[in-house]
Image (cartoon, coloured by chain):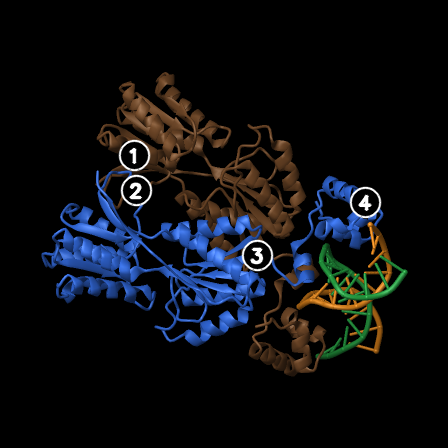
Chain colours: A brown, B blue, C green, D orange
Amino acid sequence: MKNLTISDIARKAGVSKTTVSRVMNSPEKVEEGTRKKIEQIMKEAHYTPSATARNLSKQISSTIGVIVPEIGNAFFGELFKGIEDVINKNDLSLLYCSNEDKAQKDFEALDMMKTQRVKGVLYVPAVNYPAVRMMGKVQKKLEALGCPVVCIDRDISLHMDTIHFDDRKAVKTAVLSLVKAGHHKIAFINGNEEKNILAIERYEGYREGLKEAGISEDERLVYQGEYQQSYGYLAMKELMEKELDFTAVITCNNSLGRGYLQAVHEAGRADAFEHISLDKIEMLDLLRIPNNYMLRDSYEMGRQAAEMLISRIAFPDKKIRNILLETSLVKETF
Amino acid sequence: MKNLTISDIARKAGVSKTTVSRVMNSPEKVEEGTRKKIEQIMKEAHYTPSATARNLSKQISSTIGVIVPEIGNAFFGELFKGIEDVINKNDLSLLYCSNEDKAQKDFEALDMMKTQRVKGVLYVPAVNYPAVRMMGKVQKKLEALGCPVVCIDRDISLHMDTIHFDDRKAVKTAVLSLVKAGHHKIAFINGNEEKNILAIERYEGYREGLKEAGISEDERLVYQGEYQQSYGYLAMKELMEKELDFTAVITCNNSLGRGYLQAVHEAGRADAFEHISLDKIEMLDLLRIPNNYMLRDSYEMGRQAAEMLISRIAFPDKKIRNILLETSLVKETF
DNA sequence: CTGAAAGCGCTTACAG
DNA sequence: CTGAAAGCGCTTACAG
């Protein structure tokens, strides 16, 4: 079925396009009788105005762009849900694009958002651009966008609205909690700074925790590679093989945590270590497998990020905000 | 930064808008010298044409709408990924909207897609509309959309392109496999037809399997409620309490499967039953927990659905296609 | 309260 | 090979 236009409605109603437009945009300005009649006709004809035409005419947009690494990871899945809820509540549409943690994809995503002339962008950078010396390019792309952007989860050192977790503190808390439980040799499996500036923060948190506990760092217990299950698996496997007699492990995101679990279960040493992961790992509670983690409420982060963007769109000159979210230690025993 | 328009570029290059437009749409028609010059200027100015204006002018769209229940469920997460890959490959944008398995949200999503004048829609219906007697409304909305739609996973008995799994056969296979392993009392936890027509198919598969095995159905072993973890949990709990001495359980989606696991682990009877779920349940392999499931490759379903939509857009008069995907039994032991 | 006209940023048939 | 003009479906300042 072909879409009707405002002219079709105007003709059917015997009025001008202007009047039809008014019943949609400022109904109080049109006489009740004609308004009712036009509304009736629009309804019968299932008329829906074209957002394309309206956006062009009004020089606005009704869609928000969302760029995330991938939706498969539960952390980002929840984040996305938080975003979605706010977007729906505000009658906006959501243009989705993943960047798969790759700079190239990231750039394409930003270009696409520009082409689509979105109202604003919620952006989880694929890469830690400062660390890989690509700041110029992202910065240019971001400026070229011509719309507000909120940077989520991964800071790229630009003067813009941002929101992320206090991961330094989270890891420090984890370390101190383990020490308190009697652990002095704590292995640390992390990603690296190129992918994610948080890797640095996390490592700092680890060191601060040890320092505060009066424990000197043992380099052999520190693994910093990719934020992937496979890396977590290999790191933990190597750690076990080296027999460094550590008694606890901290893994710095849920993928690494899964890798840890894979390794210890494969080795039949699931109960050999105390483990704290950053982020909850799904299924464990359900299977009644004891599990400690630093809870980072990514739904809430998504929600707040979206709210921040919407407020930025409304007040472009508002002061820049950088939100730091707290995490909390959750111990699940059965 | 304000977005530049084609007029800005034309002025800078000292040519008409027409010529600028041509270098974007049919470069071969413009003299090489001027083309190069214009391209250079566009590049320097970081000019990106507005999709909004182009779409309005060309009376086309460059975005595909995707309506899914929720992205949190791994089954739909994978489906979505399959869709996304095809959409990206075809240089299209993705407008996302979830319906949360609710008819109301579904209608809003369809309205939104219409407003946005998308090129086509990939649609997982929230509800089994024929069963709840709301066919009229969806049908009208679908027609009003004015663009091709591919119906995914849940058939709603409309004459349109569809794709779904052969779940009847899947469940039948599961039953026969269990019987072969010596099980004669097989509990069956399913959703209901209002939500999902597949519930009927699955139940049929269950009955066919039993029949073929010469086993008569025991109604007390059949639970059909919501496709949710909580229902799976309650159903399994009740089944165990009733001491019906069944030895195997089939759960009809991954949420129900999780509920089953929750119940048996809570009761400390994880090894008491043979279990086959529809869809893989994440984490189990990693934790080396034996698990049998009917593999339904939802990534592939998403991919094929998207391909089907794109082909439908290209050839509107092509014959309607209804794709039925096969599943396979996977046994994971350690 | 209503409408004619200009404009949003593009495309394209037509004329040169 | 190039450009002026009309048009896509809306909105809105202006005039009545």
Whether residue B62 is situated above or below residue B43 in the rendered picture: below
Q: Is residue B140 visible?
A: yes
Asked if the residues shown at circle 1 and circle 2 are in contact, with their CB atoms under 8 angstroms apart, the answer is yes
Quadrant (top left/top right/bottom left/bottom right) for the N terminus of chain B: top right
Which comes sooner in the sequence, label 3 or label 2? 3
Whether residue B145 is situated above or below residue A114 in the rendered picture: below
Q: Determine whether the residue tagged by mark 2 lies in a helix, strand or loop.
A: loop
What residue does disc 3 label? B63
What residue does disc 1 label? A261
Residue in the image at 51% along x and 72% along y: B143
**Which chain is mark 2 on?**
B
Residue type highlighted by circle 3: Thr
Give the numbered dot on residue B283: 2
Residue in the image at 50% along x and 51% along y: B86
Report the mark closest to the observer, 3 or 4: 4
The alpha-carbon separation of the residues under discs 3 and 4 comes to 32 Å
Whether residue A258 is situated above or below residue A225 in the rendered picture: below
Asked if the residues shown at circle 4 and circle 1 are in contact, with their CB atoms under 8 angstroms apart, the answer is no
